[in-house]
Structure formats: C-alpha cells, structure tokens
Amino acid sequence: MRVLITMITFAITGYSMLSGAQAACTGSNGRGWGTGNGAGQFEMTAADKTCRMSFQGVINEAAKTRIPATQVTITRAPASGKIAVTKSGLIYTPNKGFQGSDTFCTNNTTPKVPGITLSGCVTVTVR
C-alpha cells in the first residue's frame, strides 16, 4: 500500500511540475506579422526547461477567424538556445545556464491561405 501511495504522489507531483513549467512561460506573439514586422515577447525563468508558443495566425477579419500558419521557416536562429517546430507550435529551449534575452525570426505560411506570409521576430527573456 505504501508503494502505491508513493507512486501516485510521484505521478501527481511530476504532472504538477510539468504544468507549472509550461505555465511559467508567458507572453504573446505580438502584432505586425502580416506586414513583416512581427514582434513577439515571452518570459520564462531559468528553472523552466522550455517555452511553448503558438503559431502565428492569419486573421480573417470578415469571418473573425484565426488560421494558424503552421509551415515555419527559421530565418534567424536564436544565439543562446534552440527552436523546435511541433504540431502545436514552437518550443524554445535555452542553452544550459543561459540567462538574458534571445531572439529568433521566422516566416510562417499555411496552405489554407495561399500567398500570405507572416514574418517577424520573437524575443524570449530567460530570468
């Protein structure tokens, strides 16, 4: 019985730590992506392992919808970390021990809206 309780506690604690790390990365993709001047800002702590960001989105004003631009080209890699493109967005992982600001830039497109490219840069500050 004691082993079972320990395992459940460990699983719950591990889940909480994962959720807390994901929630600690805050910020926004910002504005200006449609004009090529996108400017996103995110913050995370050094204890956080990653910063998860959603895809930039093409906004259809008439329909009031947002279509994620999931085809991403990194045009400027971060100097002090790595970027991964996943099915749900971008993940920034700082280099071990890095603290400060790191910037990367992207071009984003979607086959659902041909001919539109969203571009700009995102700065992630690691505290």
Image: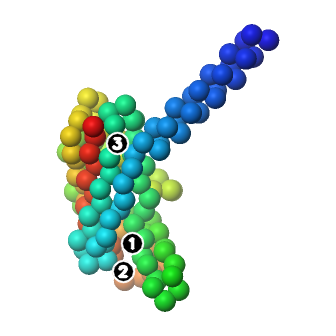
Q: Amino acid at mark 2?
A: Ile
Q: Which one is earlier in the sequence, the residue at label 1 or at label 3?
A: 3
Report the disc number at residue 44.
Answer: 3
Q: Which residue is identified by label 1?
A: 109
Q: Is 84 in front, or is 41? A: 41
Q: Quadrant of residue 119?
A: bottom left
Residue at point 42%, 62% (across, down): 55
Q: Secondary structure at mark 1?
A: strand
Q: Position of residue 4 (x, y in %)?
A: 75, 16
| Residue 107 appears in the figure | no
Q: Which residue occupies 34% across, 37% down?
A: 45
Question: In this image, 99 relative to 26: left or right?
Answer: left
- Quadrant of the image occupied by residue 127: top left
Q: Residue 106: horizontal and vertical position, in percent? A: 29, 62
Say which residue label 2 marks. Answer: 116
Q: Amino acid at mark 3?
A: Met
Q: Badge 1: how crowded within 10 Å, few (<14), some, or many (20+)?
A: many
